Amino acid sequence: MAERVAIVGVGQTYHRSRRPDVNQVELMNEAVRAALDDAQLTLKDIDAVVMGNMELFEGNYLVDMWASDGIGSYLKPGMKITTGGTTGATISCAAFTYAASGLFNTVLAVAFEKQDEGDTRAGLISVRDPLWDRFMAIGAVATFARMGRSYMRASGCQEEHAALLRVKADRGACRNPYAHLKLNLTIEDVMNSRMLIWPMRLLYMCPTTVGAAALVVASERKAKKITKKPVWVQDWVTVHQQSARVHRPGEEARVRTIGVGETSHERAAQLIYKRNGITKPIRDIDVAEIYEPSTWGELIWYELYGFCEPGEGWRWAEKGVTDMEGEFPVNPSGGVVATNPIGATAMIRIVEAALQVRGDAGEHQMTRPVRRAFTTAWGGQNWTVATLLSKSI
Amino acid sequence: MRQEPFVVPGKLVVPYRYFVGRLASKALIALRDDKKVMGVRCPTCNLTYMPPRSTCGRCFSKLEELVEVGDKGTVLTYTVVYHKEPVHPMEPPFVYGLIKLDGADTALPHFIGEVEPEKVSIGMKVQAVFKDKREGNILDIKYFKPQ
């Protein structure tokens, strides 16, 4: 890249099921003001604004047409981006690219979802192939149930292992002032929650959340002037793959064991590790903020990201490896299963990872120093955005 | 023999509601209950926005000061709709205009009625006509008519 890039300000709203007190623009405005305050900048310092959410989730799809006064993009360059669940990360990566290009020094990225206003499913149906897949748009609950069932059958994982991870997520959420579900859960609470589709219980699935997030990103020269604690964006990668298909001969076995073929998660992780000399994530990365809309996804994705060996994810859950105090903490914020304002969710991973690198996460700050953080985003059934954030360059 | 291309017919139904926020709620209550048209003032830029909004795009100030902008204004521009579409709110021909209310610095999109479309002109002075049964949305103003 032409210029190194750092995150110099982060912001998010508090997250709830409903926000009847604000409209969509006012919701985004809260996150933008928080990020500008965090960077100690004003809108005059911002050269471009990138924003987005999920199309049709609120019954609209070009929010940038009428949100410019509230998000700070009035008369400024920028664009709107929608890429499914990865939206918040793609917006962030666009801001990184803008700042790295040398065209813009300081870039604002804004993401939101106001799920108390629309019909999330109505929006989701339109993402499926209209010819072959749309009639069977089964939604995220069934997709993760299918993955969980295949994984249990193939690996020896029991439901208790998912419950352990769900309680781990809740412990993080209870320490996170912005988190949505803070439930003080026990294993029994989780395993007694309502069964949706075996083995998917209500508490293994993310809530529908209202919230927004924002980042201020700057090129190296500018970043050093703005803050004493820049969080360097070491690398980012996006991998796309078509959803719901077995692509190549040989993938059938994979579908049987984890319910999916070769995934964009594996490809993205391998790519970003290789480019950055990461050979053993558990040693080379200090914390991960991953996009896990369901606890069943989290279990399997430990393996797909190469955190652990195939079939070992549930053993990690048993040993507490990914607890905040564990050897390889994952989602100290409480993660997506506790808070999922869809368009903003992937940006919140980056916000939380940046806070961990800075040491500013508060009650859910890791006690060990964080030099390098890894984030992921997931969309459709096979899109991944991964980023590496670093304390030093 | 010529064959028709295969198509998959479909229809998306996307229901939604929109929470208007505190500031617009106050403005809509004034419109519904008192037939008062409210804008919001930015003290920094010395501008009054109509429709009201809670942030000034120019200076990024939070806006809270609702002010009455009155029910009379000027047509800044307009267009006459002659063709019929399912999304249109009324039978053609009808007139859409941008109306700058006397107490505002920005224009409000609305209908212009009680006038032959051919007689509407830029700069025409108009006045709001309110519905008898008002519900708290911008269509509580039926249209603007010539003063």
Image (cartoon, helix red, strand yellow):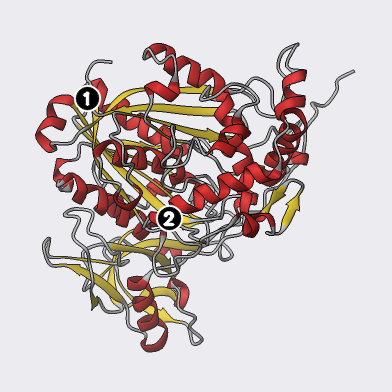
Tell me: residue B3, above or below residue B136: above
**Few, some or many residues within 10 Å of mark 1 (<14, 14–19, 20+):** few
Q: Residue B48 placed where, x, y %? A: 20, 67
Q: Quadrant of the C terminus of chain A?
A: top left
Which residue is denoted by mark 1 in the rendering? A392
The N terminus of chain A lies in quadrant = top left
Q: Say which mark, if any, is on residue A346.
A: none
Rendering quarter of residue A214: top left
Three-letter amino acid code at disc 1?
Ser
Look at the numbered discs 2 and 1 and tell me whether their residues touch, using CB distance below 8 Å: no
- Residue at figure coordinates x 36%, y 34% from the top left: A92
Helix, strand or loop status at disc 1: loop
A323 to the left or right of A67: right
Tag 2: amino acid: Ala
x then y, percent, for residue A93 = 37, 29
The residue that appears at 22% across and 66% down in the rendered structure is B63
> Which residue was labeled with disc 2?
A179
Horizontal side of A386 relative to A234 (left or right) equals right
Mark 2 secondary-structure assignment: loop
- Across and down, in percent, residue A234 comes to 31, 22
**Comes first in the chain, label 2 or label 1:** 2
Q: Closest to the observer: A275 or A48?
A: A275
Name the subunit of mark 1. Answer: A
